[in-house]
């Protein structure tokens, strides 16, 4: 089985997790979703610092999906300074069969989106500002910028149509199966 790696990066509150979960629902059973926050905060309980334990585990889980899952979605802030080398290694590991997306939104938009989330009480605008990394592009060929003008549906349609030969078939099949 040929596996497509989809990497979703961007600042906190940009919509990465929402899009990743929607893609997993669309692609259906056997789609591996690797969330930086789940691995780092929930599984390992480590801070996002250089050399933290989550880098290796994120890489291992993401590699696990190759040849076992049609789609592997990796999502998170994934700051280039700390995660860039690992991400480039994963793209090579997937033999270039990877699409990279960056949520390129203004700070004010991420604050607005954050205020509509469950985590609003966990951290606020001050934390968002401290974590903010504008234009933290990975710089790989074909990296696609997702902007504030794009709706959730626009983004989902773009990702599903970007070279995902089997995606449309799998989405239709999944929808048919859910209807039964």
Image: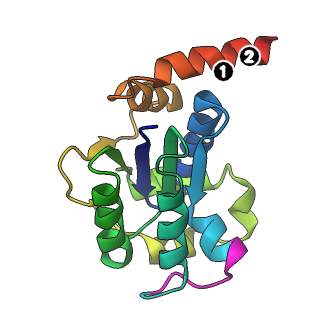
Q: Quadrant of residue 114?
A: bottom right
Percent position of residue 173, x then y: 62, 16
Judged from the image, the secondary structure of the residue bearing numbered disc 2 is helix
* Residue that carries the numbered disc 2 in the rendered image: 177
Q: Quadrant of residue 13?
A: bottom right
- Majority secondary structure of magenta residues: loop
Which residue is found at the position 42% from the left and 47% from the top? 5
Q: Quadrant of residue 31?
A: top right
Judged from the image, the secondary structure of the residue bearing numbered disc 1 is helix
Percent position of residue 14, x then y: 49, 51
Left or right, residue 22 beside residue 8: right
Which residue is found at the position 42% from the left and 87% from the top? 50
Look at the image and name its color scheme.
rainbow
> In the rendered image of this protein, does residue 24 appear above or below residue 124?
above
* Residue 44 belongs to the span the image colors magenta: yes
Tag 1 and tag 2, C-beta contact below 8 Å: yes
Percent position of residue 51, x then y: 44, 88
Instruction: Tell me if mark 1 has few (under 14), some (14-19) or many (20+) residues whose alpha carbon lies within 10 angstroms of its own.
Output: some
Residue 155 visible to the viewer:
yes
Q: Which residues are magenta?
A: 42-49
* Residue 178 belongs to the span the image colors magenta: no
Q: Which mark is residue 174?
A: 1
Which residue is found at the position 31% from the left and 56% from the top? 91
Question: Disc 1 and disc 2: Cα gap in Å?
Answer: 5 Å
Q: Nearer the viewer, residue 69 or 5?
A: 69
Which residue is found at the position 38% from the left and 23% from the top? 165
Q: Nearer the viewer, residue 1 or 135?
A: 1
Left or right, residue 19 beside residue 1: right
> In the rendered image of this protein, does residue 147 appear above or below residue 35?
above
């Amino acid at each position: 089985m040929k596996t497509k790696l989809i990497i979703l990066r961007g600042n906190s509150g940009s919509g990465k997790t929402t899009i990743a979960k929607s893609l997993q629902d669309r692609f259906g059973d056997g789609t591996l979703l690797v969330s930086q926050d789940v691995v780092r905060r929930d599984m390992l309980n480590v801070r996002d610092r250089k050399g933290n334990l989550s880098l290796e585990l994120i890489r291992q889980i993401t590699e696990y999906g190759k040849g076992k899952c049609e789609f592997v979605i990796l999502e998170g802030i994934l700051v280039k300074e700390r995660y860039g080398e690992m991400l480039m290694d994963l793209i090579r590991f997937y033999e270039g069969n990877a699409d990279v997306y960056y949520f390129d939104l203004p700070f004010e938009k991420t604050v607005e989106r954050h205020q509509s989330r469950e985590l609003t009480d966990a951290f606020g605008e001050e934390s968002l500002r401290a974590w903010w990394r504008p234009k933290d592009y990975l710089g790989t060929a074909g990296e696609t910028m997702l902007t504030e003008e794009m709706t959730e549906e626009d983004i989902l349609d773009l990702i599903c149509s970007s070279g995902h030969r089997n995606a449309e078939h799998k989405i239709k099949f999944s929808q048919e199966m859910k209807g039964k």
